[in-house]
Amino acid sequence: MNTFKKIRHSQSSINVMYIPALIFFFVFIAYPFIQGIMISFTDWNGYSEARNFIGWKNYARLFADKDMGLVIFNTFLYGILSTVFQNLFGLLYALFVDMKFRLRGVVRTIVYLPVIVSPLIMGYILYYFFQYNGGTMNEVISWFGIEPKNWLNQWSSSVTSIIIVNNFQFIGPAMIIYLTGLQSISSDYYEAADLDGASAFAKFRSITLPLLMPAITINVVYNLIGGLKLFDIIMALTNGGPGYTTSSLSTFMYSVYSGQQDAGYATTVGNFMFVIIGVVGLLVLGNLRKREVEY
């Protein structure tokens, strides 16, 4: 009986420890989220006390907005290419530094180092790399007789610049996750494969890749969500422009709120972005989890 009481007392103590987390969740996540949904049905400008209910007008405006097509395209472009390049190069770097050589610690540090810098600061630093007058990029190509180019003033080159900077900064975390996955694979599998005379490619395809699926799931979902909500680097390099040509949904939302002082429409864009990221993230997560195997 005493033991039963101790268990009940212990369980009650654990339940009490949830309370601060629940308070934090409702105050800082649930309440602002509900407020955001309510504001999206108003014409609030973000400053005045007047909030007039306008029904679904902001949502109708969202789907009729002439800039929204390119903004959504850019958002998915940032998300997909961030996922592809960060996973591809993260895996290649992980395979490289998993080998035993003298300077592998130095290589890991160099690859991981950019992520410790704020994305906004990284964007401002590399802005001077891509800028037209005196930028490093134009200085380098001028050595080969190529005319300088305004890299941040045209859609193709400015979007490419944003993708390069984003991938440069976040390949390091992908490498670390893949490296952890590689080092958790038992060497017994490779020794057995060696006895069967398997080639290096066969071992990678049949052992390494399947057992890395948990790491692939984490990296793909993490990089995809990071790319879909990309904000800081875009603001630092192009401010979403010219016009909205390099904007993502997050920078478009910021522009609507700060530039047009239209909090109602801005929260509508934010809710739309939340739905897109939630649906895409859950679909990709569910698909990848089905492919994970245990030997």
Image (tube, rainbow, N blue to C red):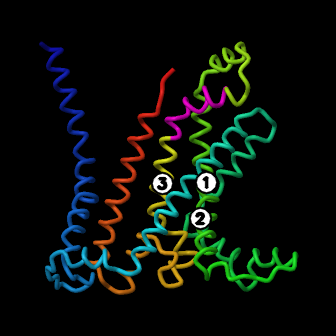
Q: Earlier in the sequence, mark 1 or mark 2?
A: 1
Q: Nearer the viewer, residue 117 or 97?
A: 97
Q: Main secondary structure of the magenta part?
A: helix
Residue pointed to by mark 1 = 85
Query: Would you call the spot at circle 3 few (<14 residues within 10 Å), some (14-19), or many (20 or more)?
Result: many
Q: Which residues are magenta?
A: 203-216
Query: Would you call the spot at circle 1 few (<14 residues within 10 Å), some (14-19), or many (20 or more)?
Result: some
Mark number, residue 224:
3
262 sits to left or right of 130: left
Q: Percent from the top left, x then y, of residue 215?
A: 52, 38
Q: Is residue 194 above or below residue 261?
A: above
Q: Percent from the top left, x then y, of residue 293?
A: 48, 27
Residue pointed to by mark 2 = 163
Q: Percent from the top left, x then y, of residue 88?
A: 62, 48
User: Could you tell me which secondary element the residue under label 3 belongs to?
Assistant: helix
Q: Look at the numbered discs 1 and 2 and tell me whether their residues touch, using CB distance below 8 Å.
A: yes
Say which quarter of the image contains residue 266: bottom left
Give the amino acid type for the residue marked by disc 3 in the picture: Leu
Give the amino acid type for the residue marked by disc 1 in the picture: Phe
Looking at the figure, which quarter contains the N terminus?
Answer: top left
Q: Look at the numbered discs 2 and 3 and tell me whether their residues touch, using CB distance below 8 Å.
A: no
For residue 207: magenta? yes
